[in-house]
Amino acid sequence: MPTRTGNFPIGFRRGWTDWQRGEIATLATWARETGFDALDVPIATPADVKTLAKMGLKMGPVDLLDLGDIMATDLAKRRDVLQKNLAYIKDLGAAGVKLFFSVVIPGDHAAKRADNYKLAIECYSPLAHAAHSVGGSIILEGWPGGPPNYSSLCCTPETVRAILKDIPRGMALNYDPSHLIRLGVDHYRFLQEFISQVRHVHAKDTAVYPEAQYELGIYSGSSFQSGHGFGEHTWRYTIPGHGVARWPDIFALLKSTNYPGIVSVELEDENFNGTEAGEKAALLHSLNYLRGA
């Protein structure tokens, strides 16, 4: 059952708790019977692709292997991870996977951003070429990383714009408004600028807390209180509709530009994660909210 605006298939990203980490067929059965159209499988096999196709579900992106080591400081480690990923892209591409998910995570979080960007181009160019050769793309998510460095790249327009220019083939975007919101980047304007390069959408939201921002500022944290799960003191990730993302506007823009992809719930919400009952309730709530958006 598609969305009201745009008729986009709705899926979710397979999580890490026990009920989601079992047999892929079991999770796919629950997804299909619940009304989802697709499943993102972070680490997949060609057999997983066949299972989802047999069950009538669309296959979402798969993660590149060892994301945190693609830009490892050790050259031998980088080369090893590169070769593993090139083989992974070739095998899964032959099985029908076209989207390979990644986050640009530096091996040296304290290095200058300009130096890490140069290394990112070196490390990701052959991966993008490999994805392009199987008719696919590397899709970058703009997760900024955690404190104190917030060192991940290609999270804001400056470096997103640059990497799409410097790697013109086989490089595209996963649009996740939750990260842009926590960074203070206008998530709707970002979509307007980069929509032609968006190949996948994460349905995840962010709640913001102005009073906490007044007390603590954006970066300092608290000397006395713990922050939010899946967040910090001034913000936290939520299911879609529980934050400030403009989902009706997002869907209308996707529709107007004939976005061809999947919208997948990425469940990270302290009010739901951690139990099977809570996570299933969150996924169902997200599905119903997105259907009507």
Image (spheres, grey):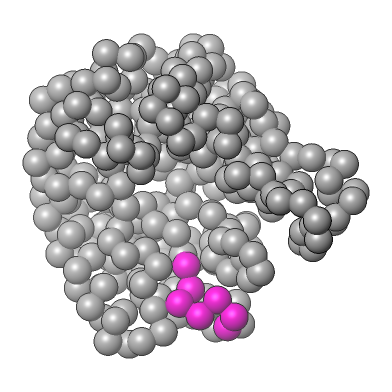
Residue 183 visible (yes or no): yes
Where residue 261 appears, x then y in whole percent?
A: 37, 33
Q: In which quarter of the image is residue 187?
A: top right
Where residue 86 appears, x then y in whole percent?
A: 20, 66
Q: Is residue 261 above or below residue 285?
A: below
Q: Is residue 25 above or below residue 266?
A: above
Q: Is residue 187 left or right of residue 59?
A: right
Picture residue at 11% right of the left edge, 25% below the top: 54
Picture residue at 40% right of the left edge, 75% below the top: 71
Q: Is residue 92 left or right of residue 206?
A: left
Q: Is residue 131 above or below residue 286?
A: below
Picture residue at 58% right of the left edge, 30% below the top: 271
Q: In this view, does 229 lie above or below 121?
A: above
Check the image and name the residue furthest to the right: 214
Residue 195 visible (yes or no): no
Query: Front-most of 175 and 40?
Result: 40
Picture residue at 27% right of the left edge, 13% below the top: 33
State the extent of the magenta-drawn residues as a range.
105-111
Where residue 32 appears, x then y in whole percent?
A: 26, 18
Q: Main structural element of the magenta stretch: helix, strand or loop? A: loop
Q: Is the C terminus in the top left, top right, bottom left or bottom right quadrant? A: top right
Query: Front-most of 119 and 62?
Result: 62
Query: Front-most of 43 and 185?
Result: 43
Where residue 268 appears, x then y in whole percent?
A: 51, 39
